[in-house]
Image (cartoon, rainbow, N blue to C red):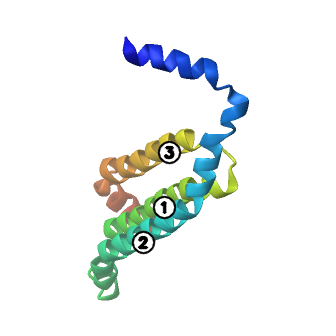
Amino acid sequence: LRYWAQYDYAKNLLRSDDQGDAYGDAIHGAGSFLAVVGGLHVAVSIYLCYAFLRPLWHADRLGAADPAMRAQMLRVLIATVVAVVSTLVCYINPLVGFAHPWYLFAIDSVINDLCLAILALTDSDGDAAAARDASG
């Protein structure tokens, strides 16, 4: 009860004009920090994609990669690019200010989950069969 009384008292004393755009100022002020964190996050994501694909590329150069493995490499590469770009947009947004950050982070989460689902739920046997059919 005491908290609510203090809140009502403060609310009556402070008008929104007095408060200014504190939320907007905080988001814009954190924009540079978020850009650095975003750049680091993108660099780590790209490195993880490279670390995952490096043995597959090596097998492909040695001739040990089958068409299903090549299709999986392409899917991983595309899903990683889509996920990293969507995350980078979220980190750059406070500097540019084209959408509310909460909406973008939610959309980014959905995009990242869809990328993971595409990778987890795709049919590698179907890729191999389609590659065999395409090659003759």
Type of amino acid under label 2: Ile
Front residue of 25/68: it is 25
Q: Are marks 2 and 1 in contact (CB under 8 Å)?
A: yes
Three-letter code for the amino acid on which mark 1 is drawn: Val
Question: Relative to 56, is 113 above or below?
Answer: above
Residue 99 higher or lower than 18, as above or below: below
Residue 27 rendering spot, x and y as whole percentages: 59, 49
Instruction: Tell me the number on the disc at residue 46.
Output: 2
Q: Residue furthest right?
A: 17
- Closer to viewer: mark 2 or mark 3: 3
- Label 2 to label 3: alpha-carbon separation: 19 Å
Q: Which residue is mark 1?
A: 84
Cα–Cα gap, marks 2 and 1: 8 Å
Residue at 64% x, 44% y is: 24
Q: Which residue is mark 3?
A: 105
Q: Quadrant of the C terminus?
A: bottom left
Horizontal side of residue 77 vs 8, given as left or right: left
For label 1, count other residues whose C-alpha is less than 10 Å away and answer few (under 14), some (14-19) or many (20+): many
In this view, the residue in front, 5 or 91, is: 5
